[in-house]
Structures are given as C-alpha cells and as structure tokens.
Amino acid sequence: MQSIAASFTHYYRAFIRHASRHIKRAITYLILSIGGAVILLPFFWMISSSLKKQWDVYHFPPVWIPNPPQWQNYVDALTVYPFHLYLLNTSTIVVLTCLGTVLSCSLAGYGFSRLRAPGRDVIFVLLLSTMMLPYTVTMIPLFMLFNKLRWVDTFRPLIVPAFFGNAFSVFLLRQFFLTIPRELEDAARIDGCSSL
C-alpha cells in the first residue's frame, strides 16, 4: 500500500512539474504575442493609411480597414513621382557610405587593437573624446567647410566623410578585433600571411 502511495506521489509531483512548465511557457508566449502585436501595430497602421484617401487618414475614431481600398495610391507613388530616382539616390549614398565606413574604420580599429605604437592609447582616448561633442557644435563649421569646397547640394558631404571613419565605428571594430585570439594571427603569420 505504501509503494502505491509513493508512486502516486511521484507521478503527482511529475505532473505538477510538467503542468507548471507548460503554464510558464504559455504565459511567455502570451507576453511575447502581446509585445509582437504592439510592435506590428504601427506597421499595420502604415499599410492601412497607404490604402486610404488622403482625408480619411485623419478621421477619428480611426478606420483600420479602408473601404474601398485605394490601390491607385501605389500606382501614383511609383509613376507620378520619380521613385526610381529616389531609390537610385538612396542606394548610391548607402552603398558608398557603407563601403567607406567599413574600409576606413576596420583599418583604424585593427591598428588600435593589434599594432603597438607610442601614444596609441592616448590617440584612442582622443578619438573617443570626439564622441562627446554634440553634433550641433560641429554642424555650422562643417557647413562652412562644405560650402567653401562647393559641395553644398551634392552627395559628397554625405559620402566622403565616411571614408575618413567615425569614432563609434572605430571603437566597435577595435573591440571586435580584441576578441580575436592573437594565436590565430600568429598561425596566419607562420603560414605566410602579413598583418593586414
């Protein structure tokens, strides 16, 4: 009789553990679902607003599902306005800026993490201290510089500075390079590779 009670207690405890695990998982999924709905709500509102007439966007209470949907809005956005030009401009700026940032900041970050030079740490601290300057302090001098270079109303002020690096990206890449073991670099040197 006692063995039956012990086995019942064992199965009961296992059932409680199993049920509590499922309840915790259900609560976790419920919280994640609510959070996902909150995050997706602005996206759904954007899609809903894009299918409305212009004055219907401001109705209160808001109408979530437009009736009838204005599919012509998408045709107008792609034909009335030079959307292809906007896409080309954005792509040009993004690709060249990313290329410049990766090239310049990876070299600087590697230098700060691997190469030994007198004053290296002082220069790195000076580089980091530039992040403490608010953009509003440098905005007018930058505009004056770009104006003297006749770069105003061109893409050059958006692209060229990326090829000279920025402190935040150099810092991030330096920290990444510090996580790579030096033994890998030593093994590569034995195989005939250079530092870069």
Image (tube, helix red, strand yellow):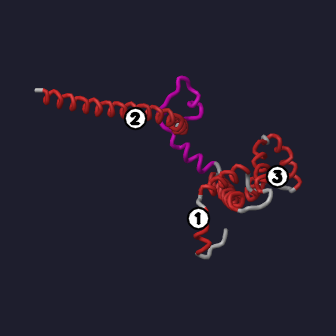
Tell me which numbered mark, 3 or 1, is placed earlier along the sequence: 3
Residue 105 x %, y %: 70, 57
Residue type at mark 1 is Glu
Q: Residue furthest front?
A: 2
Disc 3 target residue: 152
Tag on residue 29? 2
Of 39 and 193, which appears nearest the observer? 193
| In magenta stretch: residue 109 | no
Dot 1 surroundings within 10 Å: few (below 14), some, or many (20 or more)? few
Tell me which numbered mark, 3 or 2, is placed earlier along the sequence: 2
User: In the displayed structure, does residue 187 sit left or right of residue 154?
Assistant: left
Numbered-mark total: 3
| In magenta stretch: residue 54 | yes
Disc 1 target residue: 183
Tell me which numbered mark, 1 or 2, is placed earlier along the sequence: 2
Residue 29 x %, y %: 40, 35
The residue segment tinted magenta is 52-80
Foreground label between 3 and 1: 1
> Disc 1 versus disc 2: distance between alpha carbons?
44 Å
Residue 112's image quarter? bottom right
The kind of secondary structure element at disc 1 is helix
User: In the displayed structure, does residue 19 sit left or right of residue 169?
Assistant: left
